[in-house]
Amino acid sequence: MQTTPKTTKDISFEEFQSEILSDYKIAMTSRECSLLGRREVLTGKAKFGIFGDGKEVPQLAWAKVFQNGDFRSGYYRDQTFMMAIGQLSIQQFFAGLYGDADINHDPMSAGRQMGGHFGTHSLDDKGEWKNLLQQKNSSADISPTAGQMPRLLGLAQASKIYRNVKGIHSPKFSNKGNEVAWGTIGNASTSEGLFFETINAAGVLQVPMVISVWDDEYGISVHAKHQTTKESISEILKGFQRDNDNKGYEILKVKGWDYVELIETYQRASKIAREEHVPVLIHVVELTQPQGHSTSGSHERYKSRERLEWEGDNDCIRKMREWIIANSISTELELDTLDKNIKKKVREGKKAAWESYQNPIKEEQLQAIQLLTKLANVSTNKVFIERVITELSNVSEPIRKDIASAVRKSLRYVISENSAEKENTKEWIDAYMVRIQPKYSSHLFSQSKKSALHIKEVLPTYDSAAEDVDGRLVLRDNFDAIFNKHPDALIFGEDAGTIGDVNQGLEGLQEKYGELRVSDVGIREATILGQGIGMAMRGLRPIAEIQYLDYILYALQIMSDDLATLHYRTQGKQKAPLIVRTRGHRLEGIWHSGSQLGGVLNLIRGIHVLVPRNMTKAAGFYNTLLESDEPALIVECLNGYRLKEKLPLNLGEFKTPIGVVETLKTGKDITLVSYGSTLRLVQEAAKELLQVGIDAEVIDVQSLLPFDLNHDIVKSVAKTNRMMVIDEDVPGGASAYLLNAILNEQNAYQYLDSQPKTLAARPHRPAYGTDGDYFSKPSTEDIFESVYTVMHEVDPDAYPKLR
C-alpha cells in the first residue's frame, strides 16, 4: 500500500489527516451498524438483516468521485456508500431495519423493503420532479440478484441521450450528459444472465456506466469455483477490454482493502466514464464478509478455518487502520478512543430509531386499550373483552397488527349489543384502518395530478374527405407527431430503427429524428426494458418496444420486480413513466400466439395494461400516457396493421381514456365483453346472432389494468341479465380476471338470470397455420354457438337446440 493517496489538488497534512479519519469514522460507523443490526434481528426486534460489512473501504473510495446528478443502481451491501454521500444516517439505518412505515424515519422505502435496500427521493410530495442535478441519486434497490443491472443501463444511456440529442430542455436532469451511472453487484450474482446481457449492451451502446463487482469469493455458501469460470469475472471478460481498434470496456482490478489504490482506481474510472462515455468494470477483489451472507445463517458452517483466519487478517477496516497507524496519521490509542465513541453513537442512534418507531404505536395501543376498557364496562361479555385488553396491555413492544387485531376481535363480543361505546369503537377502528392501511398500500399508481386517470378523452377528428389508410399509417403519423411535440420522447426495439419496425409503424422516422431517438437494439428484451426504466427515471419519455407479446416473458421479471413496484416501494418518491410497446393477438404458432395475458396481468400490478382494438385507439393511448407520469404496457393488434382506418386530423392530440370501456353495439339479450383482435370476431358473431333473433350488446374493454372504472359493464348486465366474456387467452386467464371483476367488484351477479360464461382459447398454445388458429382459439362460430346455447337454456322453444 502506498504511503499517501494521489489527490487532484495539494492539501495540507491537517486536511489530509482530517479526510482520512473522516473516512475511517464512516467505515467504523457502518461496521458497528452491521454488528448491532445483526443483534437486533437475533433478539427479534427486526425480521431479517443483510448488511454491508466487509465492503466499507472500497465504498469510501467510490463515494469520493460520485457527483451530484450521478445515479447509483446497486445491491444490498452499499450502506457505507450511502452514509458517505450523506444519504443514510445511523437512525435511518435502524428505522429501515425495524420496518418503520414513516417515510420521515425510513426515507428509503417507509418500511416497505427490508434494510439494505437504498434509494433517494427524485420526487417531491406532489409527485413532481426534484432537481436531480442538485443531489446525489440512488435508484431504489430490488432484491432479485442482478435485477439492478438492466435499469443501470438505462440510467447510463440517459446521459448519452442528453449529451447528443438536441432540443431537450433538461435543467433538472442533466448537465450535458456528464453524469455517470454507478452499479454494484456481488461476484456470485455476475453468473446471472441479466448481468451478461447488460454488460454486452453497455459495451455496444458505449454509455457512462461504472460497475463495481464486490468479490468476497462466495455466493451465500457457494464458493466462486462453482460460480464463475476461472473464478474471476474480470478474467473471463477480458474480451470486452477496449483497444486501439475496437470499442469496449475499461476493465480495472483492485484489492478491496487497499485504500490508496482504491481511490486512484475510482478516480480513473470516473474520468473515463464521465468524459469519454466508455463503460468501466471495476473488479474489487480480496473482500470479506465478516458476518456471513445474512442473519439467516452462519458462515462458519461453510468456510474453512483457514479462510476465516484470512478474512480476519485481511478485513478492509483492519488493513485501513494498520495503514493509518503505520503512516503516523493517528495512533492506536486515538483510534481506540474513536472506536469507543462510534460504538456509543451507534447505540444512541439505534435507541432513537426504536423509540421513534415505537412511540406512535404505543400511543395507538393506549388509545385502543382505553376504548376497549370503556366497551368492556358496558358489555355483558366484559370478561372476554378484558382478556383481550390484558393480552394487548402485556405487549411491551407492540406492532400495529396487535392493536388492529385486538379491537376487531373485541367487536365480535358485542355483535348483538347496542351502546355508544360500541359505536365509538367501530368508528375508531374504521378510522384507524383508513389512516394506517395507506402506510402499507399507497402509491401502487401515481397519486399526482399527472395520473393517467386524470387525462380526459379527446376524440379524433376527421376531414369530411378523410381517406381510409392502413392502420399502421395512423400509428406512424401519430408517432411522427409525438416525436415532434415531445423532444424528450424516443423509441427503441428490435427492427424499430432502419426498417421502421416489422409492421412499418415507424417507417421513415429514424431518418427524420436520428438513430438515438428511433433506435435498433439487439435481441435482448430484459435490457430493452432496463433501458426504458433507467431513462424514464431520469426525466426522458422512452417507449421500449418488445417485438411480440410472447417475447415479453424474457423481460417479465424486470417488469414485475422493478418497474411495477418502483412507485410503491419508494412510497411515491421515484417514478419511471415508461411505455412498453408490443404487439400480439391472433398470431399463429406455439411461440407467436400472444396469449399469456392472464399471467402478465397478475404479475405486473402497478403498470397499466392496455389492449386497443385498432391503431387509432392505440395511438390515443400513446398520446394519453405521454401526458401522464405512469408506466404502461400497450398491446397492439398484430393483424390490424393492414386493416383500413380513417386518418385523424388531430394526430398527437386525441386521447384514449384509461380504464374506460366502450360500447360498440347496444343490445337487449346478452352482454358480450371482449378486447383486441377477438373483438372483431365478437362483432361479426353479433351480426349473425341478429339473424336468429338474438340482440347482443358488445363492449370493448380497451383497458385491462385498470378495468372499467365507471362500472359500465354492470349497467349493461342490469339491462340484458346475461353475460359472456370472450378472449383468446387460456382458460382461467384474462377472461377469468375480467369475470371476477364484473361479478365480485361490480356485483353484477345480482342482475343475472343465467350463468355467466367465459369463452377462452384451448388450454394449449395454438398450432401453426390458419386451421391451428381456428381450432385453438375462439372462432366466430364458437362465439355464435356459445351465445345461442345460453339463449336456448333461457327459451328452448324460441331457440331450439342447435346441435
Image (spheres, grey):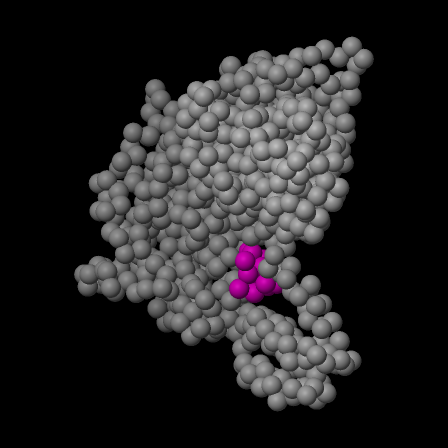
**Residue 246, image x, y percentages:** 35, 22
- Is residue 654 or residue 324 the one in the foreground? 654
**Residue 110, image x, y percentages:** 58, 59
Determine the residue located farthest toward the right in the rendered image: 464
Q: Residue at x 36, y 36 (%)?
A: 196
Above or below, 651 relative to 118: above
Query: What secondary structure is the magenta-colored segment mainly?
Result: loop
Above or below, 179 relative to 478: below
- Is residue 429 or residue 630 the one in the foreground? 429
Magenta span of residues: 99-112
- Position of residue 306 in the picture relative to residue 731 (left or right): left
Dividing the picture into quarters, in which one does residue 542 lie? Answer: top right
Dividing the picture into quarters, in which one does residue 238 lie? Answer: top left
**Residue 654, image x, y percentages:** 74, 27
In the image, residue 111 lies in the stretch drawn in magenta: yes
Q: Residue at x 55, y 48 (%)?
A: 565
**Residue 24, image x, y percentages:** 42, 60
Dividing the picture into quarters, in which one does residue 190 lie? Answer: top left
Q: Residue at x 42, y 35 (%)?
A: 764
Q: How many marks?
A: 0
Determine the residue located farthest toward the front in the rendered image: 797
In the image, residue 780 lies in the stretch drawn in magenta: no
- Residue 542 visible within the image: no
- Residue 114 visible within the image: yes
- Position of residue 257 in the picture relative to residue 80 (left or right): left
- Is residue 624 or residue 782 the one in the foreground? 782
Q: Residue at x 78, y 10 (%)?
A: 465
